[in-house]
Image (cartoon, rainbow, N blue to C red):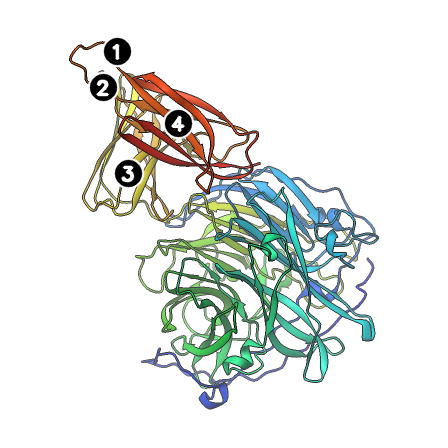
């Protein structure tokens, strides 16, 4: 092993006052400077391990391709894990860049047809079925930057602390990574940013380098541990700022990148970037703890930008706080206003304990109490961090924590701990990430370890209607396969430093990305611990939708499903799914889409017939898609007895969802033309038009334009000449018109 070119040791020391419980805590937000309110600054964050330099080995093994993992064992009320697959691991990361790295810094985001993950120091993208589509090292390997993801920005080392998000406003992925050199007076610090021009990560990317070497308090400082978020106007990046020479913390900074879709950064032109001391400008002072920007969903007032959250604040006498900064007018003259949101009294200590693991006395590093992930949606600000509860079942154990804040009042709505005691007694949980859908249902991914289990990747969730302070049972993304020890000769057995959770923009489900301890190997310097990463897709809700009735029977040797809703608010439609022959996996039935009834609030009756010949007992369930994109599932039903019922289903006007979708390059579109009443009887005809339109409403293809008979029809669309993106197809039959969307994913 060759040691890093530099190694910084940052020894943190702070005092925490004796915490006293408050029986009736005041949860109203407080406004004022920390000094005025008697609130202490959070402890300084640790320098990220990626910034401490790449650790090089004499032997780099070949890239390990992902493999499928068996269905995870789920707790009874945990969210439903519908898909999982493994991604890059310790050796594979080394194969990309020529260096081994700890911690992996796993982070990921989902788009319409792909998931993208980054670790130190590479980027990969997969199909949602788990097939590796592409991957590159982020920066320079030991000899060259040629062939790297950020090649056009001439990286001088392997980069560190990467993160990736999906900009749902523009349909693009955004990647950030950091670069730093220690060369005396010529030391450098850069933020490297990339944005895809479409939702396809295999396509073209735009790149931007930001000089983050900033003079603060009489000296130059470098940027570490980025936070990244977007709204409809800008990309927000935050960093902790450290001394090049001593490693001392000098607060945080916020960079605002104007999207500028026409002529600006998102349009391939010059980027407009501003940098701000948001802590000082908001009255908090030079915030020594990490500040985390909120990934914003929805459309609040035009002048609003986003929120920035800092954790670890305390009055030293029993009260804990989140500091929340409101960013206004981000593209003009940004303003910053701060408020302290009380967390309800004696809830946690800011000093974390490292986690035990099975098979060794070496503990897993859990880092510090910094805010790890924040999301704003529907007037609510959600976030996660890691702490140590001072009471309850998890007292004294490092534990993942989530919070929910009402905006713009910035008052606490809810909070909770993810104890993991249903995984194993004495479980430590850490490095959580959160995703929130349009129904305010939540999924949270986290790491967990205990003296009786190896460190692994887990998840939980909660519905908007769940009881305050609660979350569901723990689900298993991938349990640890072995114990993990990998320090590269340093004092810390690094894990994390974060994880990924995001919303699937195509169906509203959740994707989580995290690491687990794989089987030991790759021995050098007496250590053989290895990490591996995994993706998991969770159903959009943890509980099934409620129906007045849902049944199935065999009719004409086909399974006919019938159901009646309790209400129909915002219902877009239903898809039918089946699970056959004892399989653990659900498959969506081709052309099973049944249109809903918009925003009606009265019960509705539906029916769908599965066209396969019934041969054996089969499970069925329904997937309901709402107009806002959220997805819900019913409890399954078992159809197990054939009957002798015969009936003739009436023919009606309908346009099915194309299948497959997304697709490349062909897909099938089915539609049904109702019979036209005629006094003379005989075969009926209708003039039919089926056309394709792009997002600007321009006609790009005509599939049908003429007279057709009543009945069921199918046409094929070949989109070889189409660009990747979302299109609309419209069926017109007489006075009947139906429209659906399709996605071309190349």
Residue position marked by numbered label 2 in the rendering = 676
Query: Is residue 503 rendered to the left or right of residue 148?
Result: left
Q: Position of residue 686 (x, y in %)?
A: 29, 19
Q: Is residue 705 above or below residue 405?
A: above
Towards the viewer: 151 or 314: 151
Q: Earlier in the sequence, mark 2 or mark 3?
A: 3
Residue position marked by numbered label 4 in the rendering = 690
Q: Where is residue 7 in the image (x, y as percent from the top left)?
A: 77, 69
* Tag of residue 107: none
Residue at position x 52%, y 82% in the image:
284
Gap between marks 2 and 3, in whole Å? 24 Å
Q: Does residue 422 appear in this view?
A: yes
Eye-nearest disc, 3 or 1: 1
Residue position marked by numbered label 3 in the rendering = 596
Gap between marks 3 and 1, in whole Å? 30 Å
Q: Earlier in the sequence, mark 1 or mark 2?
A: 2
Residue position marked by numbered label 1 in the rendering = 683
Residue at position x 43%, y 58% in the image:
297
Disc 2 is placed on an element classified as loop
């Amino acid at each position: 092993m060759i040691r890093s070119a530099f190694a910084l040791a940052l020894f943190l020391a702070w005092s925490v006052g004796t915490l006293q419980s408050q029986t009736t805590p005041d949860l109203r937000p407080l406004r004022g400077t920390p000094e005025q309110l008697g609130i202490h600054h959070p402890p300084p964050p640790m320098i990220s391990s990626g910034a401490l330099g790449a650790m090089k080995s004499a032997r780099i093994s070949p890239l390990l391709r992902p493999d499928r993992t068996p269905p995870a064992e789920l707790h009874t009320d945990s969210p439903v894990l519908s898909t999982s697959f493994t991604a890059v691991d310790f050796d594979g990361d080394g194969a990309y860049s020529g260096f081994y790295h700890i911690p992996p810094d796993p982070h990921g985001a989902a788009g319409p047809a792909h998931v993208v993950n980054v670790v130190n120091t590479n980027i990969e993208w997969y199909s949602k079925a788990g097939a590796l589509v592409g991957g590159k090292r982020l920066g320079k390997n030991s000899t060259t930057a040629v062939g790297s993801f950020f090649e056009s920005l001439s990286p001088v080392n392997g980069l560190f602390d990467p993160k990736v998000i999906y900009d749902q406003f523009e349909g693009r992925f955004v990647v950030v990574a950091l670069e730093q050199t220690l060369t005396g007076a010529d030391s450098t610090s850069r933020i490297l940013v990339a944005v895809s021009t479409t939702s396809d990560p295999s396509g073209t990317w735009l790149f931007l380098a930001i000089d983050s070497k900033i003079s603060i308090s009489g000296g130059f400082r470098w940027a570490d541990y980025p936070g990244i978020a977007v709204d409809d106007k800008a990309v927000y990046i935050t960093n902790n700022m450290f001394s090049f020479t001593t490693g001392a913390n000098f607060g945080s900074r916020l960079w605002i990148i104007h999207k500028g879709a026409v002529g600006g950064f998102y349009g391939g032109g010059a980027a407009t970037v501003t940098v701000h001391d948001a802590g000082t400008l908001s009255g908090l002072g030079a915030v020594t703890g990490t500040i985390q920007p909120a990934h914003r969903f929805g459309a609040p007032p035009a002048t609003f930008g986003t929120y920035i959250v800092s954790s670890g604040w305390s009055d030293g006498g029993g009260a804990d706080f989140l500091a929340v900064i409101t960013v206004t007018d981000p593209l003009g003259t940004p303003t910053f206003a701060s408020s302290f949101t009380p967390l309800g009294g004696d809830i946690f200590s800011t000093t974390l304990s490292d986690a035990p693991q099975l098979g060794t006395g070496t503990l897993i590093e859990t880092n510090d109490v910094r805010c790890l992930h924040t999301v704003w949606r529907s007037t609510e600000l959600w976030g996660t961090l890691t702490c140590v509860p001072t009471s309850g079942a998890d007292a004294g154990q490092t534990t993942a924590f989530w919070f929910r804040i009402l905006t713009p009042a910035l008052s606490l709505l809810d909070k909770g701990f993810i104890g993991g005691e249903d995984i194993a007694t004495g479980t430590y949980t850490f490095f959580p990430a959160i995703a929130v859908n349009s129904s305010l249902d939540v999924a949270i991914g986290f790491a967990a370890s205990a003296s009786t289990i190896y460190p692994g990747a887990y998840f939980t969730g909660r519905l908007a209607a769940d009881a305050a302070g609660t979350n569901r049972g723990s689900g298993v993304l991938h349990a640890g396969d072995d114990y993990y020890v990998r320090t590269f000769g340093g004092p810390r057995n690094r894990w994390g430093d974060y994880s990924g959770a995001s919303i699937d923009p195509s169906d509203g489900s959740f994707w989580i990305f995290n690491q687990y301890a794989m089987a030991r190997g790759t021995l050098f310097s007496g250590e053989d611990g290895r990490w591996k990463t995994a993706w998991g897709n969770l159903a959009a809700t943890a509980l099934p939708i409620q129906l007045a009735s849902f049944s199935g029977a065999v009719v004409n040797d086909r399974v006919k499903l019938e159901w009646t809703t309790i209400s129909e608010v915002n219902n877009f439609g239903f898809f039918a799914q089946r699970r056959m022959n004892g399989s653990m996996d659900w498959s969506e039935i081709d052309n099973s889409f049944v249109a809903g009834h918009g925003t009606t609030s009265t019960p509705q009756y539906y029916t769908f017939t599965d066209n396969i010949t019934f041969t054996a007992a089969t499970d069925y369930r329904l997937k309901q898609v709402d107009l806002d994109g959220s997805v819900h599932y019913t409890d399954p039903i078992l159809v197990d007895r054939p009957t002798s019922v015969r009936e003739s289903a009436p023919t009606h006007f309908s346009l099915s969802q194309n299948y497959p979708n997304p697709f490349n390059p062909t897909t099938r579109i089915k539609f049904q033309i109702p019979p036209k009443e005629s006094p003379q009887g005989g075969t009926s005809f209708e003039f039919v038009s089926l056309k394709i339109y792009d997002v600007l409403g321009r006609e790009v293809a005509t599939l049908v334009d003429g007279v057709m008979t009543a009945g069921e029809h199918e046409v094929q669309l070949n989109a070889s000449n189409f660009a990747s993106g979302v299109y609309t197809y419209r069926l017109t039959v007489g006075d009947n018109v139906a429209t659906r969307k399709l996605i071309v994913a190349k």
